[in-house]
Amino acid sequence: MEKTIFEITKMDCPSEENLIRMKLDGISGIKNLDFDIANRKLTVFHIGQIELIEKSIAELNLGGQKLTTEQTDESGFEEHSNQRKLLWTVLAINFAFFIIEMTTGLFSKSMGLVADSVDMLADSFVYGISLFAVGGTLIRKKRIAKLAGYFQILLAVIGFAEVVRRFLAAEKMPDFSTMIVISIFALIANGVCLYLLQKSKSKHEAHMKASMIFTSNDVIINLGVIAAGLLVNWLNSNKPDLIIGAIVFVLVIQGAVRILKVGK
């Protein structure tokens, strides 16, 4: 058996891990995948088929690059029996905050919150695909991934169009206090999701490194919405909210493209 280590420079949170797992699913030579999100590393234990593994990782455009390949006698890989329970937990958290942020975003006139809610929904799609496709055929998994990807793009395009409309029209100021408070709760939720998923895989330590939280794009987005809320209040302008909304919708579309590549 061989052990190949990849550096995945754009692997920022567990949703990207699940995308990689889905993409590599079906490659019979793979015996185990070991993810180290904190250091953006993936270790693949496999028998042959390295070219196919490299090609599949490269297709996701996550900055995957092979570092080393060596022989290994390692075996008896751990199966995490609670993996499905954890996926259900993070799916529930993400979907709940999709509803919370979408609702409060619409009422507070904040496109930043609306955009972040769609990003939360995007993560829910990834976890949902991982759950509902378990035990299913490869064709079924690809079909689900395609439907999720196209729906995600549709929502992001509608949201982006609304951002453009609000740039051109005179709109009411968003409620900056709602933006900040809800984003702080979303920030905590993302940290909890990342903590739960990483803690479940920890072999030697029960606590996640604090720096790991801040490798997540989701957390950066939350901080961006908080900053936009402060700028809305300071500048008495809705432009910071619209700018962060536009940026997040672009990121959501990029994520959707990755999901569609899983469906190829």
Image (cartoon, helix red, strand yellow):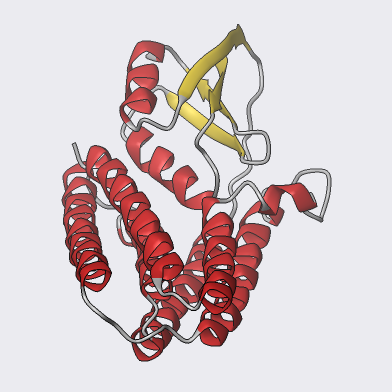
Q: Nearer the viewer, residue 2 or 6?
A: 6
What residue is rendered at 43% in x and 80% in y?
101
The residue under the point 30% across, 55% down is: 133
User: Which image quarter is the N terminus in?
Assistant: top right
| 66 is higher (above) or lower (below) than 37 | above
| Res. 130 in view | no
Report the label total: 0
Residue 200 coordinates in the image, percent (x, y): 67, 55
| Residue drawn where x is 60% and y is 82% of the image | 181
Between 194 and 70, the one nearer to me in the picture = 194
> Is 227 left, or right, of 118 in this rendering?
right
Q: 135 or 88, which lies in front?
A: 88
Instruction: Report x, y in % for residue 13.
Output: 54, 49
Q: Work out whether 50 lies above or below 11.
A: above
Residue drawn at (63%, 46%) of the image: 215
Image coords of residue 19 (percent x, y): 39, 44
Residue 262 in view here: yes
Residue 72 falls in image quadrant: top right
> Which residue is nearer to you in this view: 79 or 96?
96
The image quadrant that residue 126 belongs to is bottom left
- Image quarter of the C terminus: top left
Left or right, residue 53 beside residue 191: left
Q: Residue furthest bottom?
A: 107
